[in-house]
């Protein structure tokens, strides 16, 4: 006799197609543990009748869930939950800025099985070309186009993640003794790179759109002699979530053109293309190094980055690549290629986007006005506050089992401008995230920030 499904059928509340709403509802309940591993899902026709949708819609949704590794179908028996829930960790970690986890054991196993059927030993028995294999460069260029950055693969070099791409760009624009301008609050990795490479780092005033053009103009007029560059994240700025309008992007580009300053653009938090907000590299290709990576949009261990290089700087980047001698993992490249072939990239990306939306919505519900509201969805949110409040929040939260990003790690030059705390939403389970955000809200409401406005 067939087991009765314990799941209460529902569709997610959204304007998406019925199949997408069914996928979202089931994925949410599976990931939250409301349906256990091994539990049977309703039969196709039964579920279709109960929800008032077609059998084909149910079949399509179940197929997507199976490709994600969340369910498995057994011929003659039905469809069952396949996800093994992860064990709870001693700390809830809101300090690691990674995308929500959607890669399951079944999806990974299916990918590796597919690879084993047509593995090319020559691919693993030799070094790849310096800039990467042509086919892989075309795939990454295609991925960048999906995010709004149209580029010729011949102007792109593969890197071991976006961090490596940024490091290469720094080495040919600033080098030791040069100056790098950036936002007052910035990516901790860039702070580490400038210290390691002996580059003078200057953080500039921000507002609710990110870097202030007037602050950049004044800084460039007063700049000291030597090599100089600008590092900036126009979309979903890390850590503040600020996003530049098109007018702001054009203003930044105009200033850099006027002062002949190269731009290093970090675009890892763009999840979908927006024609109204083009990358700076589309506005000023001759000035801009464009860095991006698959690790933020597909999986953190898929360390495949790309750097789009201004044509006149390509030879210098090749020399820098030769000096670093860091090749992109052949296995990662093989997985990337397989995912493009079988459509996994689209499934994983959509799943990450939906989960990111859910987590940001949860943060908005629990944190309210404590959180800077962003027009874009990413994997982190920003709580503006003074430097002393930020340090106190980190210390108190850690004593209660929640790890937060160190406020010092994002402060570009320790001038305590535009201070706050970054909360990373991707690493914990949704249950852990709910607990952690409630705790953060409770701490802050007992010690509320004095607000004149929520500009950063």
Image (cartoon, helix red, strand yellow):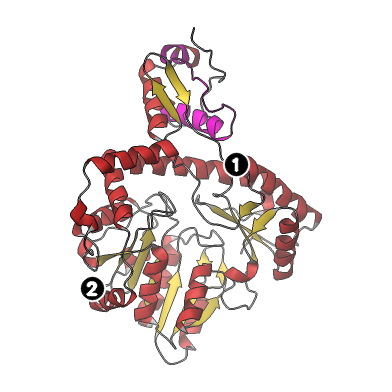
Residue 164 appears anywhere in the view = yes
Coordinates of residue 41 in the picture (x, y in percent): 49, 20
**Residue sitting at x 67%, y 61%:** 453
Contact between labelled residues 2 and 1, with CB atoms less than 8 Å apart: no
Decide: few, some or many residues near mark 1? Use Cα within 10 Å; few <14, some 14-19, many ≥20: few
Of label 1 and label 2, which has the lower sequence position?
1
Residue 19 location, x and y as percent? 41, 26
SS at badge 1: loop
**Between 159 and 307, which is closer to the camera in this rendering?**
159
Farthest residue, direction top: 1
Residue 355 on image: x %, y %: 51, 41
Instruction: Using the image, determine if residue 226 lies above or below residue 204.
Output: below
Residue lying at 35% horizontally and 78% vertically, measured from the top left: 257
Vertical side of 232 occupied by 201: above or below:
below
Q: Mark 1 points at which residue?
A: 87
Q: What stretch is highlighted in magenta?
A: 19-48
């Amino acid at each position: 006799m067939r087991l009765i499904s314990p799941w209460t059928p529902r569709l997610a509340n959204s304007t998406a197609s019925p199949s997408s709403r069914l996928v979202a509802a089931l994925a949410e309940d599976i990931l939250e543990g409301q349906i256990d591993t091994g539990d049977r899902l309703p039969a196709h026709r039964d579920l279709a009748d109960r929800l008032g949708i077609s059998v084909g819609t149910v079949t399509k949704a179940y197929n997507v869930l199976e490709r994600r590794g969340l369910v498995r179908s057994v011929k003659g028996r039905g469809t069952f939950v396949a996800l093994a829930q992860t064990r709870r960790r001693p700390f809830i970690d809101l300090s690691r800025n990674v995308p929500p986890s959607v890669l399951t054991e079944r999806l990974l196993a299916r990918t590796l099985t597919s690879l084993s059927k047509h593995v090319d030993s020559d691919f693993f028995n030799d070094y790849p070309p310096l800039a990467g294999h042509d086919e892989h460069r075309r795939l990454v260029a295609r991925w960048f186009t999906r995010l709004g950055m149209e580029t010729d693969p011949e102007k792109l070099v593969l890197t071991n993640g976006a961090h490596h791409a940024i490091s290469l760009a720094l080495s040919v624009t600033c080098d030791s003794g040069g100056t790098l301008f950036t936002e007052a609050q910035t990516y901790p990795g860039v702070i580490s790179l400038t210290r390691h490479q002996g580059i003078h780092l200057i953080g500039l005033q921000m507002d609710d759109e990110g870097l202030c053009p007037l602050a950049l103009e004044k800084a460039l007029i007063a700049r000291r002699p030597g090599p100089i560059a600008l590092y900036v994240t126009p979309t979903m700025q890390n850590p503040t979530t600020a996003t530049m309008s098109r007018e702001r992007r054009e203003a930044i580009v105009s200033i850099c053109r006027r002062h002949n300053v190269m731009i290093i653009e970090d675009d890892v938090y763009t999840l979908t293309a927006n024609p109204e907000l083009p990358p700076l590299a589309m506005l000023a290709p001759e000035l801009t190094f464009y860095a991006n990576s698959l690790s933020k949009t597909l999986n953190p261990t898929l360390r495949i980055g790309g750097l789009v290089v201004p044509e006149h700087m390509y030879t210098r980047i090749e020399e820098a690549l030769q000096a670093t001698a860091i090749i992109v993992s052949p296995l990662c490249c093989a997985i990337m290629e397989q995912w493009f072939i079988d459509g996994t990239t689209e499934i994983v990306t959509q799943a990450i986007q939906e989960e990111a939306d859910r987590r940001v919505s949860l943060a908005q519900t629990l944190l309210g006005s404590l959180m800077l509201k962003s027009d874009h969805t990413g994997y982190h949110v920003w709580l503006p506050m003074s430097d002393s409040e930020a340090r106190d929040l980190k210390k108190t939260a850690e004593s209660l089992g929640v790890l937060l990003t160190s406020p010092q790690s994002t402060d570009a030059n320790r001038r305590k401008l535009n201070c706050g705390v970054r909360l990373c939403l991707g690493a914990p389970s949704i249950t852990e995230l709910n607990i952690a955000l409630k705790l953060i809200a409770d701490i802050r409401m007992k010690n509320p920030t004095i607000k004149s406005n929520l500009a950063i």
